[in-house]
Amino acid sequence: QVHLEESGGGSVQAGGSLNLSCKASEVTGSTVLAWFRQPPGKEREGVAAIDSDGTMHFADSVKGRFSLSKDSDKNTLYLQMNRLKPEDTAMYYCAADYGVWPTLRGPLQSSAYSYWGQGTQVTVSS
């Protein structure tokens, strides 16, 4: 069973930054890792993903503000969030898949992922 653990959430003012971490218990050569978020009362949405070959994907709403990095030695994925806006307020989830679904369904589609973390809350005040 793959375990994902997020950390780094918190409360910040608009314009601030946060760096989220997702530590995976296992990362293989075919692993796709992603961040999703679910604002209060809304559907879960894809934020960013990194393919096994290092290709990155970002939602239009976060392009130019959020970035991804990965520490392979620590099996950890980071989401650096800059210039945060109140609409970024959400529970942020890390997701992983080890097969073909992210390629077939799209790397920012929640249905493509088999494993999920418990989430970390991000609150941005105006």
Image: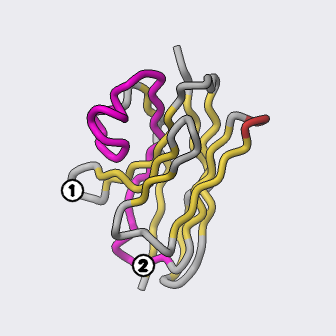
37 to 26, vertically: above or below: below
Query: Where are the magenta residues, as a range?
Result: 84-112
Amino acid carrying label 2: it is Lys
Residue at coordinates 46% horizontally, 47% vertically from top-left? 49
Residue 64 shown left or right of residue 24 in the figure: left
| Label 2, label 1: how far apart the Cα atoms are | 17 Å
- Say what secondary structure mark 1 lies in: loop
- Position of residue 39 measured from the top left corner of the image (x, y, whole percent): 30, 59
Residue 85, disc: 2
62 lies left or right of 39: right
Q: Is residue 5 above or below residue 48?
A: above
In this view of the protein, which residue sits in the foreground, 8 or 26?
A: 26
Residue nearer the viewer, 3 or 77: 77
| Residue 94: % across, % down | 48, 42
At 58% from the left and 56% from the top, the residue drawn is 68
Q: Indicate whether residue 93 is drawn in magenta.
A: yes
